[in-house]
Image: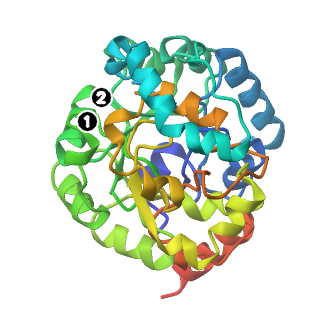
Amino acid sequence: MWNNTKFTKLLEIDYPIVQGPFGGGLSSVKLTSTVSNAGGLGSFGGQPFSSEEIIKTCNEIRKFTNKPFNINLWVNDRDARLAIFGENDYKKLTELFKPYFNELGLPMPERPTNLGAKFEEQIEAIYEAKPAIFSFVYGIPSSNILENCRRLGIKTVGAATTLDEAIALENAGVDAIVATGFEAGGHRVSFLRSAEDSLTGTFSLIPQVADNVKIPIIAAGGIADSRGIKAAFALGADAVQMGTAFLATSQSNASQDHKDKLFTSDAKYTTLTKVFTGRLSRGIKNRLTEELKNHEDLFAPYPLQSKFMGLLKAYPATENSNPDFKSYWTGQSASLLKHRDAKIFIETLVKEMNRK
């Protein structure tokens, strides 16, 4: 049976379908619990939240499901360049973006000082809340953290964008690997080399990883329907992670205009850009991505660029803003989307996968 894999056995879930975890406030309790209740693995991106907020979120999710769910964090949440990004650099950044702030009638902001929660603090919430799965991107937690998770019965899942990263994750002792190709929406989560030097496609990456690691492999990037699932399994994957397809559903916390945008022809045209956060990520092309694509040297490091762009209202989770300046994260297969309800989407996938 297609759903009887190393991954479903590891987590004791019905279907090897993982909802991609969304950072930036795009995750929701409703989506996470809906996917888990439907037999998949619901996920929640904890990257923007404090330890207290993560614990509260886990408690909320448990009110709606008793099934396993996944909390995702960023291991590397501060770019090293922050230490040398001075006031003169910030002045150049504001000069670059001043016309856009003026166009929206917004004042030029002072340099943001609150850069958000740190991974070292957030991990304490994982220990306390004890989600069934703790997944992570942008690196590998310390051996002490991974051992604590094992001791507490928390399964660990790391993300790899290259074969070398997948091997490093297995050697570190994680329980499963998300092998994510450059087709995926959102951030390119490379950690051994730069994201620009780690742009392997999903269907090239999966068989390479399958030939070299023994732990379960979750294929991610450009998978939006049952055809993608079948292809990933044929290449050696034990599960699939689907992001954009779940982001588009009513249960996600993406703004309605973001969800609607995913069903338009605009979603066919994506690009890799650093304009929104300072880290390479995939979203729909717009004025900002095109007009500033030759000025990446002036962008601030993560998360300062992200905080700065938030002041330009580039990605409010619930509020509409000028689409010319907004980040519409999406993968390369948005044109395949058909469903706006997560439960119906999973039911459709299961039905199609059950056909011989």
Residue occupying image coordinates x 37% and y 21%: 141
Numbered badge on residue 173: 2
Few, some or many residues within 10 Å of mark 2 (<14, 14–19, 20+): some
Q: Can residue 68 be seen in this view?
A: no
Whole-percent x, y for residue 63 in the image: 83, 36
Whole-percent x, y for residue 280 in the image: 38, 44
Query: Residue 34 vs residue 284: left or right?
Result: right
Residue occupying image coordinates x 60% and y 51%: 325
Q: What element carries label 1?
A: helix
| 320 versus 224 height, above or below | above
- Structural distance between the alpha carbons of marks 1 and 2: 5 Å
Few, some or many residues within 10 Å of mark 1 (<14, 14–19, 20+): some
Q: Is residue 45 visible?
A: yes
| 4 versus 145 height, above or below | below
Q: What amino acid does circle 1 point to?
A: Glu
Numbered badge on residue 257: none
Residue occupying image coordinates x 49% and y 65%: 3
Residue occupying image coordinates x 69% and y 63%: 259
Q: Do the residues labelled 1 and 2 touch (CB within 8 Å)?
A: yes
Between residue 295 and residue 249, name the one nearer to us.
Answer: 295
Which residue corresponds to mark 1?
170
Number of labelled discs? 2
Whole-percent x, y for residue 272 in the image: 38, 54
| 220 versus 27 height, above or below | below
| 42 versus 278 height, above or below | below
Q: What element carries label 2?
A: loop
